[in-house]
Structures are given as C-alpha cells and as structure tokens.
Amino acid sequence: MANYQVGYGHGDVVGVPFDFYGGATLVTGSTITMQTNQLLLQPTAAVSLTVNLPLNPVDGACAEISNVAAVVGSVITLTAVNANTGDTIATAGLGVPASITVVASTTGGSAINTIKYKYTLNGFQPASGAAVSPRTWFRVQ
C-alpha cells in the first residue's frame, strides 16, 4: 500500500504534514506505519487495519488516528495499534480502541472521530526517584 503524504493541511500556518489514506488504498488486513504524527483515514466502506505508531518520536509527541469518512456510521476496526521499535504502549487506562466510528455532528452531517496517544521518552519519577514507563505511548482520548 502506498503512503500518501498530503500537503500542509488546510490553512495550517506552521506547515505540519500528515499521512492520508483514502478510498481504494484502504484494504482490510493492511498495516499502516505512521510517518508523521497525524494519520487521516477516509474509508469508502468498513475496513479492519493495524496501525504502527511513528518511529523515534520526541518526548511529549502526540499521535492522532482519525476517521474522516463523509458517511455517519463509517467504521474502521483497529485489529491492533502497535508501538514502533523499542517503544511500548501502556496497557492501563483507556487501552486500545476496538474501532473508530464517524459520528453525527451537532450541525448535521458527520464529525471526524479521533483517538490520540501521547509519548514519554523519559517516563516520570515517583517519590522513589526511579524512572517509570520510559519510551511509552499512553492513550489519552
């Protein structure tokens, strides 16, 4: 599957590129490795995917996986969300979502549904002073 990196977003003044997969490029059973911190998926039908989070993120990085289909109820089933080489995903808290479904917006039509992960390179220090959970992605939404 080809990776299509689309321009610099809509009115984005800082010029942050994002990964975009739509239509025929979204095939059930595919694995997508994020090249940037934003992955936009626009399926034409229900699809099951595996997503690998970005390689070598900076401390505090945020990775977003979004379903931007125009149809309310469009479902992307995530068979897995994997950390890249040397990183882990925290199993506590929200965990890995089963699916990303486009929901109805309050103004009519559909609204983008996004899940987010935050990255800690150094972890955190509890009272003991030892680093806990370094090189870990935590799901935050």
Image: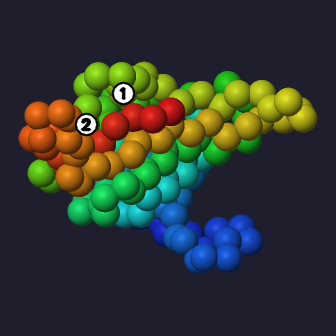
Q: Which residue is mark 1?
A: 96
Q: Which residue is mark 2?
A: 89
Residue in the image at 62% along x and 36% along y: 113
Type of the residue with mark 2? Ile
Residue in the image at 39% along x and 35% along y: 139
- The colour scheme of the drawn protein is rainbow
Tell me where residue 29 appears, x and y as whole percent. Answer: 34, 36
Residue in the image at 50% along x and 33% along y: 141
Tell me the CA gap for discs 2 and 1.
9 Å
Type of the residue with mark 1? Val
Q: Nearer the viewer, residue 68 or 137?
A: 137
Q: How many marks?
A: 2
The answer to whether mark 2 and mark 1 are in CB contact below 8 A is: yes
Q: Quadrant of the N terminus?
A: bottom left
Mark closer to the observer (2, 1): 2
Q: Mark 2 falls on what kind of element?
A: strand
Q: Is residue 85 visible?
A: yes
Residue in the image at 12% along x and 51% along y: 86
Q: Is residue 30 visible?
A: no
Which mark sits nearer the N-terminus, 2 or 1? 2
